[in-house]
């Protein structure tokens, strides 16, 4: 699309950036929740609660960064329709910022996306444009952008470059600042699941830039190529089916996924992810989305291994979004049975860990 650099457009872009920065200044940082697991004595576990952002998820940070990046590059102006390909949470957050700037917004989403997320996109004035498979979102987003003379945000390409990984209150900067007065202020591990790969890229780069000894573990759900790509480095790997854990896992290798900043990757069964959020609810009294279960299951594996080796330290992960968005899916027994399967073995495993601090094979 043609970039308009006339003074009126520059003035609008400056006004738009100021509106986003003002919105940011009205927001407090997200909480860091310490989990109480007495059987894991000597190992402190933390959840950074990203569900408390105005749009209810970690993707609020990404959407803000993407809008600022697009504005500063001159890709959107006061007449631009913004299009994004998303399984839901990024679209919700981008719809929020589009409304803040008075711009039309269209989210290209798979049909299986949770209805609650669609309602939230619409609440912020956006429109949902459905496709039949996760793999179809990219081309359809480009087609719409061309047809409407709009801008395709393309979170999967720009997530890793839109955020300043050196600091400036990014997610990693925030984690380390909040850990300053904890017993083990420098985490032994930070655990993250990849959607675009942008958050893990930010965390991994920040750890290196700050010269911390912290290791980054990235946990991937089933029906996702990131783990296989990390192990094999074949960028042509694809899958026909998409992830059943909304917001994470992709059927292709995304440009924002940077494997060289990752210390270790693990594949987490979907049933384990769902079991973990039900287990977590009994500890903190709140529901979380299934991607949080993927994260936390990896954390608990690492914690049990640390205890077995006689190590102490801290592990931090993210509570990505609220489970209230998933009452019809991950908190619906019939849906779980039909789409995920039996979670009882993983629940028993988690209860055993909680009682003994040991990982039951």
Image: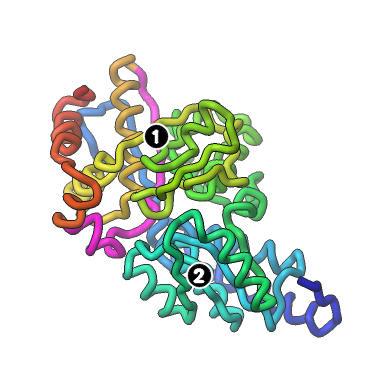
Judge left or right: residue 271 versus residue 172.
left
Judge left or right: residue 308 versus residue 22.
left
Q: Of residues 201 and 257, which is closer to you in this image?
A: 257
What residue is at 69 percent from the left and 76 percent from the top? 149
The range drawn in magenta is 311-332
Judge left or right: residue 192 versus residue 153.
left
Whether residue 58 is visible to the viewer of this picture, yes or no, is yes
Query: On the image, numbered disc 2 is attached to which residue?
Result: 107
The 10 Å Cα crowd at callout 2, few under 14, some 14 to 19, many 20 or more, is many
Vertical side of 172 occupied by 117: above or below: below
Observer-side mark, 1 or 2, equals 2
- Secondary structure found at label 1: strand
What residue is at 23 percent from the left and 24 percent from the top? 359
Q: How is the image coloured?
A: rainbow
Q: Tell whether label 2 touches label 1 (CB within 8 Å).
A: no
Query: For the C terminus, which image quadrant?
Result: top left
Query: For the N terminus, which image quadrant?
Result: bottom right
- Sequence order check, earlier mark of 1 and 2: 2
Query: On the image, numbered disc 1 is attached to which residue?
Result: 315
Q: Which quarter of the picture shows residue 69? A: bottom right
Q: Position of residue 234 (x, y in %)?
A: 58, 32
Q: Is residue 73 magenta?
A: no
Q: Position of residue 179 (x, y in %)?
A: 45, 41
Vertical side of 151 occupied by 239: above or below: above
Q: Of residues 320 and 268, which is closer to you in this image?
A: 268
Q: Position of residue 132 (x, y in %)?
A: 42, 62
Q: Is residue 315 magenta?
A: yes
- Mark 1–mark 2 Cα distance, whole angstroms, equals 35 Å
């Amino acid at each position: 699309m043609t970039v308009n650099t006339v003074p009126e457009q520059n003035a609008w872009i400056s006004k738009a950036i100021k509106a986003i920065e003002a919105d940011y200044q009205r927001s407090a940082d997200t909480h860091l929740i310490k989990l109480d697991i007495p059987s894991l004595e000597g190992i402190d576990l933390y959840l950074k609660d990203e569900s408390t952002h105005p749009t209810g998820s970690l993707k609020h940070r990404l959407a803000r960064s993407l809008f600022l990046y697009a504005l500063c590059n001159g890709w959107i102006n006061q007449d631009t329709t913004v299009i994004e390909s998303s399984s839901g949470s990024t679209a919700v957050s981008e719809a929020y910022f589009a409304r803040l700037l008075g711009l039309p917004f269209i989210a290209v989403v798979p049909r299986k996306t949770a209805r609650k997320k669609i309602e939230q996109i619409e609440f912020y004035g956006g429109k949902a444009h459905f496709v039949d498979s996760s793999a179809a979102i990219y081309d359809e987003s480009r087609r719409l952008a061309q047809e409407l003379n709009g801008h395709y945000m393309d979170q999967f390409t720009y997530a890793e470059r839109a955020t300043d990984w050196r600091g400036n209150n990014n997610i990693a900067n925030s984690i380390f600042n909040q850990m300053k007065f904890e017993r083990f202020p420098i985490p032994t591990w930070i655990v993250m699941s990849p959607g675009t790969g942008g958050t893990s890229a930010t965390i991994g780069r920040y750890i290196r830039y700050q010269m911390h000894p912290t290791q980054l573990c990235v946990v991937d759900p089933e029906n996702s190529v990131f783990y296989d790509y990390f192990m094999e480095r074949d960028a042509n790997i694809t899958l026909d089916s998409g992830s059943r854990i909304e917001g994470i896992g992709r059927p292709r290798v995304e440009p924002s996924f940077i494997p060289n900043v990752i210390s270790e990757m693990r594949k987490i069964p979907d049933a384990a992810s769902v079991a973990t959020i039900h287990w977590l609810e009994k500890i903190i009294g709140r529901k979380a989305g299934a991607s949080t279960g993927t994260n936390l299951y990896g954390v608990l594996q690492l914690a049990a291994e640390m205890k077995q080796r006689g190590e102490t330290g801290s592990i931090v992960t993210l509570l990505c979004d609220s489970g209230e968005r998933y009452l019809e899916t991950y908190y619906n027994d019939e849906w779980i049975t039909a789409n995920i399967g039996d979670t009882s073995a993983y629940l028993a495993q988690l209860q055993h860990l909680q009682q003994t601090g040991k990982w039951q094979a």
